[in-house]
Amino acid sequence: ENDGRVYNFAAGPATLPANVVKKAQQDLYNWQGCGMSIMEMSHRGKEFLSVIQKAEADLRALLAIPDNYEVLFLQGGASTLFSAIPLNLCSPEDTADFIVTGSWGDKAYKEAQKYCKANLAWSGKATKYTSIPSSGSELKLTPGAKFVHVCANETIHGVEFKDWYPAVGEGTILVADMSSNFCSKPVDVSKFGVIYAGAQKNVGPSGVTIAIVRKDLVGGAQPTTPVMLDFKTHADNKSLYNTPPCFAIYMCGLVFEDLLHQGGLEAIARKNNDKAEILYRAIDGSDGFYKCPVEASVRSVMNVPFTMASPEMEAAFVKEAAGKGMVQLKGHRSVGGVRASIYNAMPRAGVEKLVALMKDFQARHQA
Ligand code: PLP
């Protein structure tokens, strides 16, 4: 079953496609017959240059990234972008609006307060981050704000922006943290000034953060911006200003190639929607034995949180699942419950197996 591997429902680092991991295993010893592993070669050599260039080209093809956008491979995690975004897009006097739909958006908002005037334009905190604004009239946007920041998918709370994004005024740009739904579906990149994502959920191992930045937004960083946080540094040097996370970039490249082979992001989105539907249907059809607190229309296709009657019962479920080869189902420490992350690389069979256990567990535990 599953090629001798468990079904890994972790939120990140997360499961990768089995064929990609197998390919990497070979390349780790001797990459394309060059006698070195991918981890041992110079980042300036022709071998690694071909790797990073192909990774970028494949990502551009997947997301149909327009030519007036840079693709940057960065370090420091998505958390570092929480500082880099205001440092690159604002002066300390400028205002930026934050739509906070969960813990990650809240972290971005708090960090930005150090570097610009950060305004809380919407918060879902009072309702425990179970919804997303559905129209612009709910937002307290600032006229003339430099940017509006959203977290496209809140990994912990399981709320996801679907088709709707706030309309921003002329001169304001939309910035999205897509860490946990990057490349899970097609996205109209041209709607955004900056899209960024830590790779370790949907497209690779930890160690690389991808930023897609409109070219006219490069070069205006605050003067005190550390050189490593300035988008211009990385744009001018094609992500090779200093030693990049070579292995992580290589792995992302394999994943991008695999996603293209699977038919691109339309095909991937269909598979992801199908998996999510199976799981939410099981939750909603359980007569309240399992509960997902998130408003139905904005439930995440990637991270599915649910609760049961007591923390003890949840712990028993998580333990039983692990015994059956379904691991990492414990909810985030800040919210508890159970969370199934079902990223691109989670096979449908993994979700079906989880649902079968949910039904069986309910039959045995329902009062
Ligand atoms: N943004 C989102 C939506 C995340 O899920 C995470 C990590 O889980 C982060 C940001 C932080 O990413 P990193 O650990 O790469 O700094």
Image (tube, grey):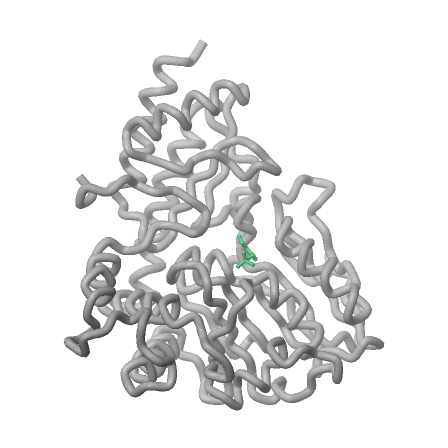
Q: Quadrant of the N terminus?
A: top left
Residue pictured at 36% horizontal, 26% vertical = 358
Residue furthest to the right in view is 93
List x then y, in percent, for residue 25. Answer: 22, 60
- Depth order, front residue of 192/231: 231
Quarter holding residue 319: top left
- Depth order, front residue of 171/319: 319
Residue pictured at 48% horizontal, 33% vertical = 338
Residue pictured at 56% horizontal, 40% vertical = 294
List x then y, in percent, for residue 67. Answer: 45, 88
List x then y, in percent, for residue 204. Answer: 38, 61
Residue furthest to the left in view is 33
Is residue 262 visible in the rendered image? The answer is no
Above or below — where is 219 with respect to 162? below
Q: Quadrant of the C terminus?
A: top left
Q: Is residue 69 left or right of residue 96?
A: left
Quarter holding residue 51: bottom left
- Depth order, front residue of 333/266: 333
Is residue 330 visible in the rendered image? The answer is yes
Ligand 1 positioned in quadrant: bottom right
Q: Is residue 247 left or right of residue 177?
A: left
Residue pictured at 61% horizontal, 43% vertical = 130
List x then y, in percent, for residue 119. Answer: 79, 63
